[in-house]
Image (cartoon, rainbow, N blue to C red):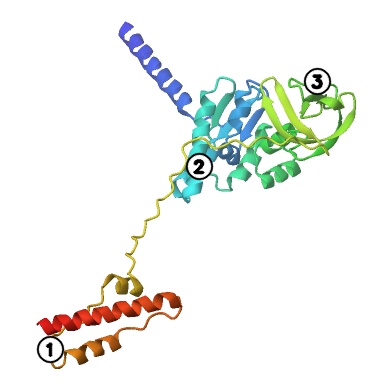
Amino acid sequence: METTQLFLVVIGLIILTEASYLVWKVPRTTIARKHGRPILVDTSVLIDGRILAVASSGFIGDTLVIPRSVIGELQFLADNADHDKRARARHGLDVVTELQAMSQVNVEIMQDGSKAEEGVDERLLKLAKIHGAAVCTIDFNLNKVAAVEGIAVLNVNELAQSLRMAYLPGEKMLLEMVQKGQDSHQAVGYLTDGTMVVVENAVKEIGKTIEIEFIRSLQTAAGKMMFAKPVGVKQPAKPQQKPHGKKPIQPVQPVKPSRPEKPRPETRAAATPTPKPPVVFHSDKNDHHLAKRQNNQRPARHNNRQAGKSQPQRHSSQQREAALIELVDKQ
């Protein structure tokens, strides 16, 4: 009897263990409402990725529910789409992993099937009606259809639009200058929402309302700050800064070799002496005629010489002729 009871107890424990295991393995098709209204996440939000910043800030107090059909669509795009869509789908899968690792938000995976035959958008609308959930999406068409069906929609684009700056760079407005800024040339004014506006070169306009043009904005953990300049006031020119670094090396132009100058014909003529005619000695009979012929071939004197000098030159020529005749006679 004791053996039979022990055997029945063992069988009961085995059945209880198997039943517990099957209950744990069965996919859950219901949403556990632990923290308020559930929010169904669309594929477009996961691909966009800005849901990470919103979730990390702690503004999502509800439970983020990601249907298995949404993950199946991301997997299909990561396997079969083109290069750009594959990269975006893989980024969406990484976003799911990061959301699950966050402690600021509750994330659940709903096992509704890995593939939606009617389409992911239709599946989301159907699940939202059944469980009374909201849909988080940035798809414009899904947003419009959900509004027609009376389903609450959380659009990340609308959130970003509502949080953007009231005035963008380039816009103008009238603003009262209240006090002096940190620098000596700055003045400070405030917008209606309390945003501080620092106006350059407006220290002389403190206590007046002037027209300003926004230049840039600065977002910090303490709040936002905007910078502007007065309209119609000439801004001081900033000194131009010389570029740092070494000067560029200029290419050296090749020097052409100079050609040697050719001597002029006059120089050649002057450099080469003219050969003198050789003196030929003849017999005694023709000596007197040879002397006269040589005297006739001599070049004539210049006419511009003075007359007083011509006479002594004639005497010298006659003496030379006489000396030449005498020399010939001796030979």
**Residue placed under numbered mark 2 in the picture:** 89
Distance of label 3 from label 1 (alpha carbons): 127 Å
Choose between 229 and 269: the one closer to the eye: 269
Q: In which quarter of the image is residue 56?
A: top right
Which residue is rendered at x = 86% and y = 24% of the image?
A: 206
Three-letter code, disc 1:
His
Q: State whether residue 114 appears in this view.
A: no
Q: Is residue 52 above or below residue 86?
A: above
Q: In which quarter of the image is residue 235?
A: top right
The answer to whether 8 appears left or right of 238 in the picture is: left
Q: Nearer the viewer, mark 3 or mark 2?
A: 3
Three-letter code, disc 3:
Lys
Q: Which of marks 3 and 1 is nearer the N terminus?
A: 3
Three-letter code, disc 2:
Ala
Furthest residue toward right = 208
Distance of label 2 from label 1 (alpha carbons): 128 Å
Choose between 73 and 31: the one closer to the eye: 73
Whether residues under marks 3 and 2 lie with C-beta atoms below 8 angstroms apart, the answer is: no
Q: Nearer the viewer, mark 2 or mark 1?
A: 1
Secondary element under disc 1, as helix, strand or loop, is: loop
Q: Is residue 259 above or below residue 71?
A: below
Which residue is rendered at x = 22% and y = 78% of the image?
A: 275
Q: Nearer the viewer, mark 3 or mark 1?
A: 1
Choose between 315 and 171: the one closer to the eye: 315
Q: Quadrant of the C terminus?
A: bottom left
Q: Residue 180 carries which label?
A: 3
Which residue is rendered at x = 76% and y = 32% of the image?
A: 228
**Residue placed under numbered mark 1 in the picture:** 282
